[in-house]
Amino acid sequence: MKKTILLIATVLLPVLVSAQAQINTKKVKIEDFMEKTTKVVMTGNLFFDQVFKEEISNRWRISPYEFCSLNEFEKLKTDENYYFLMVVKGQFRKESEPGISMLSVLKGGPAAEKGLNRMLDVVDVPIMSAENPSGREFVFLPALLDILQDHILLSMERDVAAYSGLANYTMNIGSTENMDIVFAEEDLSEGITENVRRVYFKNGISVTDADSADRIMIEHTPNTLVSFTVHPDKARPGSYCYKMLIDAGTHKLYYFRKHKITGRFGPGFLLEDINRIATR
């Protein structure tokens, strides 16, 4: 009898341990996302909020949603029945003030009393400089909202997606051999010299002014990736620059990397990025 009990315990123990581990995963914690209401938090900037509301109304498809003010968010943030989509200013350790703004999806809960950084962070995507945004955020907002939603759905299926954030999407660049890639001039770092361009900017890879690049996004030009970078308006060592390549037609994310800004490496796509992209 004792041997039988011991045998049963031996068989069940790995199952119970596995179940306990699963309960604590991020994938499990957000599995109710589609059932809960997402509160879309307004920024207080009337012009941005007007566009934000319009794009949410046109594009949000994965959960019920309601708009709310910052004051309402403060009252509701500890409620586990809500998720929150909001613009959050991010500050890295060596920055004296927030440098960029993120479009963030957070889950409500008691931990929110201790600050936003204690809330369950579902996904973040950089959207603009915290001070003096360029205006390109309005062009890319529809794509960023689609990217957020696609990632949330993927995170509900796979823990690796939930924990890795958007970084894994850089692997998609290997499937773009037959696609055009258009860089906005302002998205290239100072290290992308004329010599670099002569070597790498060919076979469907080109550079143009920001207005022309943005027009490709607005017109949903098929089979074409467009560059988008987010960094502080006054980038200093210790800040970060985020770099993205987004399909203008489908809004699929094909490249997502960040680098720390230093005296040697300023904002924009670096030679390292261009080499990685050109050898797709």
Image (cartoon, rainbow, N blue to C red):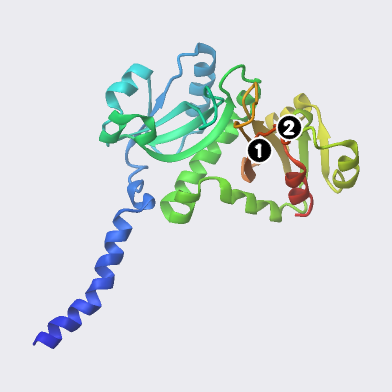
Residue 97, how many percent across, how many down?
A: 52, 22
Give the residue drawn at x 16%, y 82%. Answer: 6
Q: Quadrant of residue 258?
A: top right
Residue 259, how many percent across, how many down?
A: 64, 40
Q: Is residue 201 above or below residue 268?
A: below
Residue 169, how many percent across, how many down?
A: 60, 49
Mark 1 lies on residue: 243
Quarter of the picture holding the N terminus: bottom left
Residue 170 seen by the camera: yes
Q: Label 2 is placed on what type of residue? A: Asp
Quarter of the picture holding the C terminus: bottom right
Task: Tell me if 44 is positioned left or right of 68 in this view.
Answer: right
Q: Is residue 24 above or below residue 100?
A: below
Q: Label 1 is placed on what type of residue? A: Lys
Task: Tell me if 94 is positioned left or right of 197 in this view.
Answer: left
Q: Secondary structure at mark 1?
A: strand
Give the residue drawn at x 54%, y 38%. Answer: 146
Residue 41, how many percent across, how many down?
A: 41, 23
The residues bearing labels 2 and 1 have C-alpha atoms spaced at a distance of 8 Å
Give the residue drawn at x 85%, y 43%. Answer: 201
Give the residue drawn at x 50%, y 31%. Answer: 103
Task: Tell me if 164 is positioned left or right of 112 in this view.
Answer: right
Residue 158 seen by the camera: no
User: Pointer 2 and pointer 1: residues touching (CB < 8 Å)?
Assistant: yes
Nearest to N terminus: mark 2 or mark 1: 2
Which is nearer the eye, 130 or 149?
130
Q: Residue furthest left?
A: 1
What crowding class fits label 2: few (fewer than 14 Cα within 10 Å), some (14-19), or many (20 or more)? Answer: many
Mark 2 lies on residue: 187
Q: Secondary structure at mark 2?
A: helix
What crowding class fits label 1: few (fewer than 14 Cα within 10 Å), some (14-19), or many (20 or more)? Answer: many
Task: Tell me if 159 is positioned left or right of 99 in this view.
Answer: left
